[in-house]
Amino acid sequence: SQQGEEDPQALSIQEGENATMNCSYKTSINNLQWYRQNSGRGLVHLILIRSNEREKHSGRLRVTLDTSKKSSSLLITASRAADTASYFCATDGETSGSRLTFGEGTQLTVNP
Amino acid sequence: ETGVTQTPRHLVMGMTNKKSLKCEQHLGHNAMYWYKQSAKKPLELMFVYNFKEQTENNSVPSRFSPECPNSSHLFLHLHTLQPEDSALYLCASSHRQSATFGNEQFFGPGTRLTVL
C-alpha cells in the first residue's frame, strides 16, 4: 500500500527563513495534498497538486511534485512564528476512491 | 472554522462506559470519515461513508460502531474501550472524489478521548 513519508520529522528555523519539507510515496497517485495541524486540533487543507502538475503556488506556499521520483516538497517562504505546526502530505491513488493516505508529518517550529 | 464540528471536544471514560462522538458538516459534502490519531503514528483511517453508506471499514474493532443517519451527521459509538484506544478522533468530510474536486478533506477539531 502507498504511504506518504515526510522528511524531516522535525525542523526548527528562525522567523523569516524558508522551510522546506519533503514527502515520498510508493504507488501511482491522482493527487497529492498538504495539510497543516496545530497542536491537538484538526487538520487544515493547504494545497492540492494533481499528478499532471509539477508546481503550484498559494501565497507563501510552493509545492512541487516529481512523479518519476514519487516525491513532493512543500516550501514555506518568509516563515512566521504562526507557521509553527505539523505538516502532513496525503495521497490518493488511482484505485483508492475517496481514501487518503497520510504520512507521519513534519513538526515545524519557527522561533521568533 | 472548517464547517465541520465535533462534540464533545474532550471525553474521559472508563472501560465499561458507553459513549458517542458526534460530527456534523455544513458543507454539502457527501462523504464523511472517521480517523484516529495517536501520538507518533500516522493518521489512521477508520471508516468511510459515501451518501450515508459505509464504503470502508479499515479493520476496526467492533467496540467502535459508526452510524451515519444522513449525509450531514456522523456518529462513533464507543463501548468497552481499552486504554490503548485513547487518542484524538478526527472527523472529516469531502465531496466524493472527482476530477473536479480532487477529494480535499475538511476536518473537525477532533475529540480528545482518554480511556481509564
Image (cartoon, coloured by chain):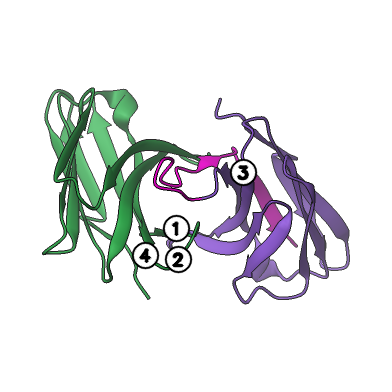
Chain colours: A green, B purple
Q: CA distance from mark 2 to mark 1?
A: 8 Å
Residue denoted by label 1: A100
Callout 1–callout 3 Cβ contact below 8 Å: no
Q: Nearer the viewer, mark 1 or mark 4?
A: 4
What residue did someone put label 4 on? A94
In the image, which is nearer the foreground, mark 2 or mark 1? 2
Does residue B4 sit above or below A105 in this rendering?
A: above
Local SS, label 3? loop
User: For the residue marked with disc 2, what is the amino acid?
Assistant: Ser
Q: Quadrant of residue B35?
A: bottom right
Q: Position of residue B72 (x, y in %)?
A: 73, 39
Chain hosting mark 2: A
Magenta span of residues: B97-116
How packed is label 3: few (under 14 Cα within 10 Å), some, or many (20 or more)? many
Q: Is residue A47 above or below residue A66?
A: above
Q: Earlier in the sequence, mark 1 or mark 4?
A: 4
- Residue depicted at x 12% and y 32%: A18
Mark 2 vs 1: CB contact within 8 A: yes
Q: What is the three-letter code of the residue carrying label 1? A: Leu
Circle 2 or circle 3, nearest the eye: 2
Residue neighbourhood size for the residue with mark 4, other residues' Cα within 10 Å, grouped as few (<14), some (14–19), many (≥20) = few
The amino acid sitting under disc 4 is Glu
Chain to which mark 1 belongs = A
Q: Quadrant of the N terminus of chain B?
A: top right
Asked whether residue B16 is in view, the answer is yes
Residue occupied by mark 2: A96
Residue B8 drawn in magenta: no
Give the distance between the C-alpha atoms of the residues marked 2 and 3, in whole angstroms. Answer: 24 Å
Q: Which residue is mark 3?
A: B110
Residue at 61% of width from left, 39% of height from top? B29
